[in-house]
Amino acid sequence: MHRVRLVAVFVEDKLGALARATKVLAEADVNIRWVGIASGERVGVVRFLVDRVPDAQKALAAHGFAVSLNEVLALEVEDRPGGLAHVAAALAGHEVNVLNASGFVVTSGKRAVLIIEVEDVARAQAALKGQHVHFISEEELIRL
Amino acid sequence: MGRNDARRGKAYWQRELETLPRRDLEALQLGRLQKTVAQVARRTPFYQAKLAAAGVRGRDVRSLHDVRRLPFTTREDLRATYPCGLLGVPREQAIRLHTSSGTTGKPKAILFSARDVDHAATLMARCLVMSGATRGDVLQNMMTYGLFTGALVMHYGAEKVGMLVIPAGPGSTERQIMLMQDFGTTAIHLTPSFALYLADVLEKRGLDPGRDLSLRLAYVGAEPYTEQTRRKIEEALGVAVFNSYGLSEMNGPGVAFECGARGGMHLWEDHFLMEIVDPATGAPVPDGEHGELVLTTLMREAMPILRYRTRDITAIVRGRCSCGRTHRRIERIAGRADDMFIVRGVNIYPQQIERVLMGLPSLGRNYQIVLDGLDEMTVRVELASTGFDGRIEHLVRLQQEASEALRAEILLRPTVDLVPAGTLPVSEGKAQRVVDRRKL
């Protein structure tokens, strides 16, 4: 079970809140490894992958932010054409409902990381079993 | 009156008066109104001046319609005549003082004669019996005893019925539970928030009200609550909850109360003459339409009040009630007249918005109503401090749910903006909840 925790913050004014939240994290000596902003109808959620989850959570809550943790899966995908298509096809084949996804390249031409948030983690894991997909743990992800 | 009748809600405390044919009831009202006007014209300088200014003499009241010729009494009048300016009897005849909480400055003082205390208790007894309470029931009174009328009027009414009254007062949940268990409490009188808290404590202690307690009736008041909250309390505590209406200026609780049919609250018209008026003009509105409730005391001895502007908005429920009582019913209070605002021609009260928002558990208590542009309404509401799970889909869905729930209540669909807890200014008064930026 390689679940990765994201620290999620509910924000009203996205950029202003992002500035404040990142300042709070910096002051708490928390390093941000990834950030994503989700926007819905007039609401926003900023999510961070950080090296020290409990400290980040504590610092943000102390500064009045509505904080929650989200569990997501991180997969290693080959950085080549069709790398992502392979994973997406496997998930689609098992009717896994993906709520959010984002990716980034770690080493150009070699490794890419895909972060996906699904409704049913067990189903996603089953779908990707035997597909030569490497799940990345939170510790591993932070060390990348 | 048998116990089984009481349980079916078929019992009356004063059958003849409660089921008096309308003609007789109105004749009774007219006689009492004439007596009340004569009394204040004779004894109260405040009303002598008001009647003179309106050009009305006591003998001008020849029908119930003539009540409209009488002057209104406002909250400001009660403050201006504080402490004893509205007394209609010598001071020595007043045996009890209650006050109504004033947000600023002096409170409103209400003085009762011995007969007034007895009448308040009698009306409360009618309400209790109407809800199915009877001799032998055990009432645990969890309201605050003191200047506030709520606890004492209930206390006296329940004793009149012959219930065993436990004057527990609020708080001390553990002791409340002990008393409920040891004395087999069947009825409770408390605020909605304490009722929900009590249910929570019982659950945490592994107590099942159905098995471990004997509760069957709950009188819930002093704070507004939704139908949803009522059902929640009913389910969690295994009780029937009855809506009630009262105000200190008119004795306190027991002015109007639901019967077993629960289709509106019977207002005791042999003690109060009711009118529903347009809050802006004071002109009467037709039965069934919303307006401000205006009450004239018909039996008040120490401190009679003519045409009191309650500022509470309600409507008369049309038609006769299946319970047999002839006293007309009013709807639950829709809001306060002072707080009303109009959007796209619809009269809206912040309390309506508040009740809907309070019914959605993921929302916090703080909200703001912003009126903008060409009659656009936005409700900004804080998410409950525990309501965030990191999922934006849930926030969007909650906004849509809140918007739809509001539409069902106020008949137009406002935009709902969810904001993090602690974002909105903490509001002192309800009126400040509305921010009107319209340029109409």
Image (cartoon, coloured by chain):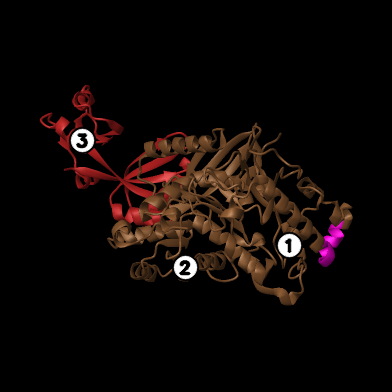
- Is the residue at mark 3 from the same chain as the one at mark 1? no
Task: Please tell me in which quadrant of the rendered image residue B216 appears.
Answer: bottom left
Q: Residue B304 bears which disc, if any?
A: 1
Depth check: B179 or A13 in front?
Answer: B179
Q: Report the amino acid beneath label 1.
A: Pro
Query: Where in the figure is residue B8, as x and y percent of width and height?
Result: 43, 50
Say which element carries label 3. Answer: strand
B11 relative position to B331: left or right: left
Q: CA distance from mark 3 to mark 1?
A: 79 Å
Depth check: B90 or A15 in front?
Answer: B90
Visual hue assigned to chain A: red
Q: Nearer the viewer, mark 3 or mark 1?
A: 1
Q: Is residue B398 above or below residue A64?
A: above
Q: Residue A75 bears which disc, if any?
A: 3
Report if residue B43 lies within the magenta region: yes
Q: Which chain does the numbered disc 1 sit on?
A: B
